[in-house]
Image: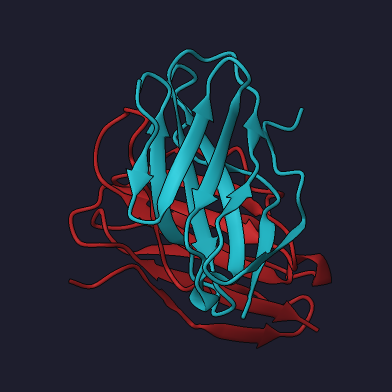
Chain colours: A red, B cyan
Amino acid sequence: GAGVSQSPSNKVTEKGKDVELRCDPISGHTALYWYRQSLGQGLEFLIYFQGNSAPDKSGLPSDRFSAERTGGSVSTLTIQRTQQEDSAVYLCASSGEGPGPRREQYFGPGTRLTVT
Amino acid sequence: AQKITQTQPGMFVQEKEAVTLDCTYDTSDQSYGLFWYKQPSSGEMIFLIYQGSYDEQNATEGRYSLNFQKARKSANLVISASQLGDSAMYFCAMREVTTGRRALTFGSGTRLQVQP
């Protein structure tokens, strides 16, 4: 079966431009997460979707960052007016239903964003 | 306050030997889950093993086992019979239940290098 897919795999953009990153979760997974991983660092949580709603946006670093999810499936993370500190790998993950502790998240291959 | 601590930035192990990667965590939640992920140089995050806070037995998955010491708040990953393909970054992560936060909190990771 298909795993989590993300596009593009690499994105180079100029400072000040807007970018859109796409995530296609595993079919049937209702929960979707965005994380950011800076060079050599651990993962930093950005936003969580349950269905099309985002009950936890606490990790978005600024109002330049936004995300949406449509049809309970594909999600888009948008970064407006990109800055050099936005350069990182953006990882998307999805998991099945339920609030219990065991809901392993399955990750996509990531989008490497470079802001020049 | 840092919730997941991985104190070993890098580890070396000889092929076929066992290695332990340390992870300590901090939470006031009684119900939580602990996860280990592997990140090879290709960048994808691969789920390895899960331990629930109420699980009485240590989790095992093939060559991976988790040495869970609840009172000490540690969840060390043990890899037996190391293989060259085990060379990667390893991340410990936690998910708390009572807080309702669904996202994983990750440690900073340990880079494991398996030597022939």
* Residue B56 placement (x, y as % from top left): 35, 20
A12 left or right of B96 in image: right
The quarter of the rendered structure image containing the C terminus of chain A is: bottom right
- Camera-nearest residue between A17 and B73: B73
- Image point 51% across, 41% down: which residue? B104
A85 left or right of A30 in image: right
Q: Is residue A93 above or below residue B28?
A: below
How many numbered dots are placed on residues in this image?
0
Q: Quadrant of residue B63?
A: bottom left
Q: Is residue B116 above or below residue A55?
A: below
- Image point 62% across, 64% down: which residue? B89
The quarter of the rendered structure image containing the N terminus of chain A is: bottom left
A66 left or right of A108 in image: right
* Residue B59 placement (x, y as % from top left): 37, 37
B31 left or right of B40 in image: left
- Image point 60% across, 29% down: which residue? B74
* Residue B14 placement (x, y as % from top left): 63, 69
- Image point 64% across, 39% down: which residue? B23
Q: Quadrant of residue A112?
A: bottom right
- Camera-nearest residue between A70 and A24: A24
* Residue A25 placement (x, y as % from top left): 31, 62
Q: Is residue B46 above or below residue B61?
A: below
- Camera-nearest residue between B33 and B110: B110
Q: Is residue B71 above or below residue A10?
A: above
